[in-house]
């Protein structure tokens, strides 16, 4: 957990830059112009990088309510209660300390001390304290648009290996009927000739027998 937190002293050195105190000392309403180089948290709001005015809202009736305005005083960003805080070492210029926050979370201002004063103002945050959860920024959906190739440039087409078609079996030839080369006439002639010879033979036998 210690690696997830930023040291309050280091955060103060990196984030807050104090303007010099007025030559006449601290003003009656405890005005301090603070310039932050990165976002910081105060009760009720997160301030972006820039210069802001911190002062007592009504120093005549209350000495523990601070108000935060834009650099020109036209915008009121927050107004909140404070409780007394103390320190051992004095500084010439106003100084803020920070609460420890996880990595990725803007540092939260803990206390404000004015130059030359041991007593400071500890900020009172709403119930639950300052934000300790890093903001999750949704990422846009990734899209792309295909562009046609420049004019005259051939379109790349992947080569496809040609596959030879399977051979188709040829159909078997139909049986061929041989042509008839002979006619039945010779057979008839042979039969008639045979009958004639047989008749002549029978006639000779009869004559010899008579």
Image (cartoon, helix red, strand yellow):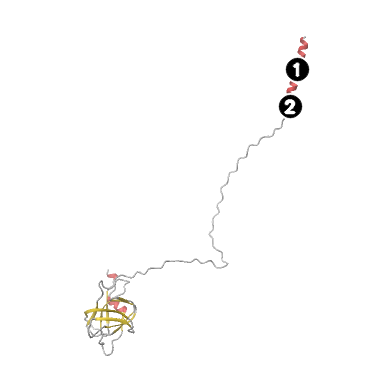
Q: Position of residue 7 (x, y in %)?
A: 28, 74
Residue drawn at x 75%, y 19% as measured from the top left: 197
| Up-down relation of residue 209 to residue 119 (above or below) | above
| Up-down relation of residue 152 to residue 197 (above or below) | below
Q: Quadrant of residue 52?
A: bottom left
Q: Position of residue 61 (x, y in %)?
A: 22, 84
| Up-down relation of residue 97 to residue 207 (above or below) | below
Pointer 1 residue: 199
- Per the model, the C-alpha gap separating discs 2 and 1 is 20 Å
Q: Quadrant of residue 177?
A: top right
Q: Position of residue 210 (x, y in %)?
A: 77, 9
Would residue 7 be found to the left or right of residue 154 on screen?
A: left
Number of callouts: 2
155, 82: nearer the viewer:
82
Q: Quadrant of residue 2?
A: bottom left
Would residue 155 be found to the left or right of residue 43 on screen?
A: right
Pointer 2 residue: 186
């Amino acid at each position: 957990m210690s690696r997830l937190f930023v040291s309050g002293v280091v955060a103060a050195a990196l984030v807050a830059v104090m303007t010099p105190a007025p030559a006449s000392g601290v003003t009656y309403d405890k005005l301090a112009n603070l310039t932050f180089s990165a976002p910081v948290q105060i009760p009720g709001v997160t301030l972006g990088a820039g210069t802001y005015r911190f002062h007592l809202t009504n120093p005549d009736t209350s000495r523990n309510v601070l108000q935060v305005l834009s650099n020109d005083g036209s915008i009121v960003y927050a107004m909140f209660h404070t409780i007394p805080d103390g320190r051992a070492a004095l500084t010439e210029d106003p100084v803020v300390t920070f609460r420890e926050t996880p990595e990725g979370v803007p540092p939260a201002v803990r206390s404000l001390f004015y130059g030359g004063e041991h007593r400071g103002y500890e900020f009172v945050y709403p119930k639950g304290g300052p934000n300790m959860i890093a903001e999750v920024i949704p990422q846009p959906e990734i899209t792309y648009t295909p562009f046609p190739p420049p004019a005259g440039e051939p379109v790349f087409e992947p080569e496809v290996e040609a596959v030879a078609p399977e051979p188709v079996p040829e159909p078997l030839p139909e049986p061929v009927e041989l042509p008839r080369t002979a006619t039945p006439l010779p057979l008839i002639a042979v039969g008639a000739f045979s009958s004639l010879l047989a008749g002549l033979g029978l006639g000779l036998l009869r004559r010899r027998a008579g």
